[in-house]
């Protein structure tokens, strides 16, 4: 691959949390944690073949010293969401056959679309078989949408076999998300003819052919073999169309994407921008918010959060649903309005219905429907003040400043604190602590230097969110009547009071934009990021900063980047 | 369409095209199945593994005396009628579940926190988990899958079933990817077996039969049509195989393996006409009802010889046992939270009450299996081995004091709470409390359970080197 100019983002303010760009490899900056928790990952995967000193991943000039290669995404099967959306778009059905498929695992850095993790087993193959049978039977129904789309050929005039070939080519293009080659079309026509010879009717034989397509690895997997020429590392036009559509819609490409791919237009950057804007404006992008934001911000985990029912009887399914909805609509608004990515952290609006507004103590919102609500208080605004995240990061009975701090470091700064050392007691509610406030218990805990090294990072952030109880209500006293102290001092001595000031500090932390970009890229690619990918992240952030650093621009720059548009080397070592 | 000889092609696929594909662990450790003379009435030994999370407090579950005729401790009172039909196992360890461990080859791990991920992930594999939150996961093959691979000739349509009462994220743990905490059954180092959570789907999978109105000729015609679809898929797969890299081909191998299995299912003649599975169950939201239905399904699957191997995750670690009454009120906190015993004796009572319920649940499965008489005159329970329990001793006891300590008293991977139901066709003398000293590896227990089912392996997991002592009596 050619060397190419790299855009290096200007070094932003020194991080208020006392960590520099080195934080990409966070433990380097945390010598006190090093002894306890470093598992020898430093120096893994050093690029081979370069002369001179080996570039060290995470070092400031790492990306200047290497030529980063886009990695290959392991052959990735459709996950449940993608399967349902795909068959619905493909066949016009309203059925959701993947609802009964085995659950997809969210391992692979938090997203359930990771090719290496998504596996196939006997049970899933049986599910594919059953789904293919019922979908094809439904598609051949007299008034089905699929019949109108793919089976309007006049068999009386053209002959049944010609109509079968017509079906194979039109349906195959959409199902395989690229035109079939002659061998493939012939193979499917042979499948049809064999069924006819076995006594099946024309329609029955078409249904069987459809079953074959829906069971094929070319449908079940997202196949990326790269362009034929001149550069095999570049995705083919249709492969790029699929990357786009599964990124922003979790579904197959629509007619326009297929058309643009067929005309070779998707390699054009302006055209890609147009397509991203069009796709985000389409309601199918609901899937992006539900699946990207839903997993990044752990709304799926929130679905299983269990506040203590005796202490919090008001926490019911409707409230849980409302909190989820608030976060999704909020993130959608931030994208659609081209607001800076920092708006996620600090905003003077949110989305509420009456139930959630009552819960938050905000007046003037009536009715079950959600609407934009301007906030006139510094106490609320931004995701750190939303019930979904506040509840997910609490224990069933109490808040957890530690978990909240860890959540922020992990999900917003991509700098997860190292594990506690082995064999320490991480539980603070022992009898000698009885009667102390949570803050006092944690402060006692931090008297131990082994704990302080990492808890000095986590706890202050969590303290800043202490004005919110375990189900996201604003409070000034804890349950025992202790007044809430929401002040915190970060490792660089920056002090703050309350979540508004905390959010202000976090959104200036340069790791924040980088972290959001890492999350978007991980989801967009469907694989874990490696050391070299940090260089593409830097590049994407730099490009986005040239414009407005909106979340939308980050999404766009991900699409425009080489790493998204490449098939990667095929023989990557495991 | 001509029939492809793709059993052969699979082998070519694995070795061909210059690919140096790392063989999954199971390829290199295919066990030998003993070929012994079997009477016509010999029904074979069935194996089930049922896992509970967060460990158990052993205080009320362990008899004071060793051997037969022990006095039932209070936590096992519900099993009085079954005392002769199961063993209490003491002193068994899964050391790879611990945060630091010195391996037989002298290497030492210090993987730190993550006891819950290791508890679940290693329960049936006894292998080391690679600590990662990314997609480079690694475990080992689990004992149930070793059994399934060897016994599949008896139930080719369904070598094993994997069940869980709950869907949804089981969550990650201290740097371990969630996949470890969500799965006990592993087909290979990187592939957990998908779990079924809907009893109706499980019933259909086990017992959905053939169309009784179709003639044999018509059934044969449908089989040929089904086969034509699968042949088409295999050909499409070979197109890809030529164009994709090593890791992609591992995924294609998963595809091919499961297509092969589907072929076996479609070619088989369908459910047991000689066995009446009764009516299709519901899918109750109540966890206790669901558990009971799953136990019915395991029993019927074994009784009808639809499969010989089952595994089940009884509950998630953060479930709420709001139907269990302690000190006059029902438990309202999540199991995991109270399992740390931060609340001292009050929490310990809650955990012990949950454990008592779990043991009642074990008893209900044993009774279902005891009620089935097999062709050899023995009960289904006699011909099975049911391992029930968890990977951690959550007693929280140190020198008589209750201590809540992660990686310590409530998270010890020694002295695992384990109960072995049935006689394994005579391999186990049940009715005893068996005690081992010196942290007997659970992997050796698995070698013995496999042997009872006629599956001989020399080693298992990290520590398994041969059969465990004392089981025969």
Image (spheres, coloured by chain):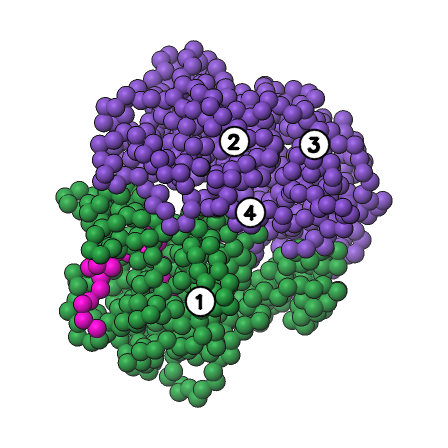
Q: Which residues are magenta?
A: B48-66
| Relative vertical location of residue B144 with respect to residue B469 in this rendering, above or below | above
The location of residue A113, given as percent across then percent down, is 57, 44
Residue at (34% x, 73% y) in the render: B384
Q: What is the chain letter for disc 1?
A: B
Residues at discs 1 and 4 both on one chain: yes
Which residue position holds label 4?
Answer: B134
Report whether B440 appears left or right of B216: left
Mark 1 sits on what residue?
A: B144
Mark 3 surroundings: few (<14), some (14-19) or many (≥20) residues within 10 A = many
Q: Nearer the viewer, mark 1 or mark 4?
A: 4
The hue in which chain A appears in the rendered picture of the protein: purple
Q: Main secondary structure of the magenta part?
A: loop
Q: Could you tell me residue A426's position as x and y percent?
A: 35, 43
- The quadrant in which the N terminus of chain A is found is top right
Q: Secondary structure at mark 2?
A: helix
């Amino acid at each position: 691959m050619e060397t190419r100019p790299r855009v290096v983002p200007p070094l932003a303010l020194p991080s208020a949390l006392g960590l520099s760009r080195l934080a990409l490899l966070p433990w380097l900056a945390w010598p006190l944690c090093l002894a306890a928790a470093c598992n020898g990952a430093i120096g893994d995967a050093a690029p081979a073949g370069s002369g001179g000193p080996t570039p060290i991943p995470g070092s400031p000039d790492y990306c200047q010293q290497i030529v980063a290669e886009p990695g290959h995404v392991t052959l990735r099967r459709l996950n449940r969401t993608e399967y349902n959306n795909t068959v619905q778009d493909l066949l016009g059905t309203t059925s959701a056959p993947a609802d009964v498929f085995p659950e997809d695992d969210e391992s692979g850095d938090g997203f359930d679309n990771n090719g290496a993790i998504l596996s196939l087993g006997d049970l899933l193959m049986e599910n594919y078989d059953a789904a293919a049978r019922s979908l094809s039977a439904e598609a051949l129904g007299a008034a089905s949408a699929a019949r109108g789309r793919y089976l309007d050929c006049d068999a009386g005039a053209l002959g049944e076999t010609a109509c079968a070939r017509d079906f194979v080519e039109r349906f195959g293009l959409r199902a395989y998300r690229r035109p079939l080659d002659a061998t493939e079309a012939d193979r499917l026509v042979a499948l049809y003819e064999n069924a006819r010879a076995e006594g099946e009717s024309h329609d029955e034989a078409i249904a069987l052919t459809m079953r074959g397509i829906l069971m094929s690895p070319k449908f079940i997997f997202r196949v990326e073999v790269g362009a034929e020429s001149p550069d095999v590392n570049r995705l083919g036009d249709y492969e790029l169309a699929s990357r786009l559509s599964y990124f922003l819609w979790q579904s197959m490409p629509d007619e326009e994407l297929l058309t643009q791919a067929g005309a070779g237009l998707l390699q054009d950057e302006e055209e890609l921008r147009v397509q991203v804007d069009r796709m985000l404006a389409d309601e199918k992008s609901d899937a992006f918010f539900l699946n990207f934001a839903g997993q990044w911000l752990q709304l799926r985990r929130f679905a299983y959060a269990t506040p203590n029912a005796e202490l919090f009887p008001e926490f019911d399914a409707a409230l849980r649903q409302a909190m989820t909805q608030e976060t999704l609509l909020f993130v959608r608004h931030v994208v659609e309005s081209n607001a800076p990515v920092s708006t996620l952290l600090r905003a003077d609006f949110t989305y509420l219905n009456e139930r959630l507004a009552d819960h938050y103590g905000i007046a003037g919102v009536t009715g079950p429907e959600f609407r934009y609500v301007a906030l006139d208080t510094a106490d609320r605004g931004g995701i750190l003040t939303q019930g979904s995240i506040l509840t997910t990061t609490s224990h069933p009975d109490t808040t957890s400043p530690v978990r909240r701090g860890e959540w922020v470091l992990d999900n917003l700064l991509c700098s997860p604190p190292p594990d506690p050392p082995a064999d320490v007691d991480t539980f603070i509610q022992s009898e000698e602590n009885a009667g102390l406030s949570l803050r006092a218990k944690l402060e006692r805990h931090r008297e131990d230097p082994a704990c302080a090294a990492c808890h000095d990072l986590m706890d202050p952030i969590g303290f800043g969110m202490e004005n919110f109880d375990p189900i996201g209500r604003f409070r000034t006293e804890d349950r025992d009547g202790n007044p809430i102290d929401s002040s915190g001092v970060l490792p660089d001595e920056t002090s703050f009071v309350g979540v508004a000031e905390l959010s202000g500090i976090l959104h200036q932390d340069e790791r924040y934009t980088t972290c959001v970009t890492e999350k978007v890229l991980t989801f967009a690619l469907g694989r874990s990021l490696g050391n070299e990918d940090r260089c593409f992240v830097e590049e994407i952030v730099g490009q986005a900063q040239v414009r407005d650093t909106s979340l939308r621009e980050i999404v766009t720059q991900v699409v425009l980047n080489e790493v998204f548009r490449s098939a990667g080397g095929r023989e990557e070592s495991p | 369409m001509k029939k492809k000889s793709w059993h052969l092609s699979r082998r070519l696929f694995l070795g061909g095209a210059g690919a140096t594909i790392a063989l999954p662990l199971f390829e290199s450790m295919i066990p030998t199945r003993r070929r012994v003379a079997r009477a016509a009435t010999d029904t074979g030994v069935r194996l089930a593994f049922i896992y509970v999370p967060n460990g158990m407090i052993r205080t009320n579950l362990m008899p004071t005396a060793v051997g037969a005729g022990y006095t039932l401790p209070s936590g096992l009172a519900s099993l009085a009628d079954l005392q002769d039909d199961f063993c209490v196992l003491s002193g068994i360890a899964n050391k790879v579940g611990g945060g630091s461990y010195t391996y037989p080859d002298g290497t030492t791990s210090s993987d730190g926190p993550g006891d819950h991920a290791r508890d679940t992930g290693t329960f049936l594999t006894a292998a080391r988990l690679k600590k990662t939150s990314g997609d480079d996961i690694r475990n080992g093959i689990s004992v149930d899958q070793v059994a399934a691979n060897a016994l599949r000739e008896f139930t080719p349509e369904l070598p094993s079933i994997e069940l869980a009462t709950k869907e949804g994220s089981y969550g990650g743990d201290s740097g371990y990817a969630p996949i470890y905490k969500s799965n006990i059954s592993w087909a290979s180092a990187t592939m957990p077996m998908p779990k079924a959570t809907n009893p109706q789907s499980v019933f259909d999978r086990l017992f959905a039969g053939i169309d009784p109105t179709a003639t044999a000729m018509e059934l044969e015609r449908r089989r040929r049509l089904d086969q034509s679809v699968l042949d088409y898929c295999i050909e499409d797969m070979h197109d890809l195989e030529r164009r994709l890299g090593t890791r992609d081909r591992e995924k294609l191998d998963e595809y091919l393996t499961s297509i092969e299995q589907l072929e076996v299912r479609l070619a088989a003649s369908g459910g047991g006409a000689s066995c009446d599975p009764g009516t299709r169950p519901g899918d109750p939201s109540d966890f206790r009802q669901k558990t009971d239905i799953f136990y019915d399904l395991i029993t019927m699957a074994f009784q009808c010889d639809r499969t010989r191997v089952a595994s089940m995750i009884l509950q998630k670690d953060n479930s709420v046992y709001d139907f269990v009454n302690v000190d006059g009120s029902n438990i309202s906190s999540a199991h995991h939270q109270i399992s740390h015993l931060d609340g001292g004796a009050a929490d310990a009572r809650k955990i012990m009450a949950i454990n008592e319920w779990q043991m009642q649940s074990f008893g209900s499965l044993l009774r279902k299996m005891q009620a089935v008489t097999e062709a050899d005159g023995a009960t289904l329970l006699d011909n099975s081995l049911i391992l029930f329990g968890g990977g951690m001793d959550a007693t929280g006891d140190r020198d008589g004091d209750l201590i809540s300590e992660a990686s310590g008293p409530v998270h010890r991977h020694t002295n695992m709470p384990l109960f072995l139901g049935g006689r394994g066709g005579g391999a186990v003398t049940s009715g005893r409390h068996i005690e081992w000293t010196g942290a007997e590896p659970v992997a050796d227990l698995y070698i013995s359970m496999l042997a009872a089912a006629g599956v001989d392996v020399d080693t298992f997991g990290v520590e398994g080197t041969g059969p465990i002592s004392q089981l025969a009596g």
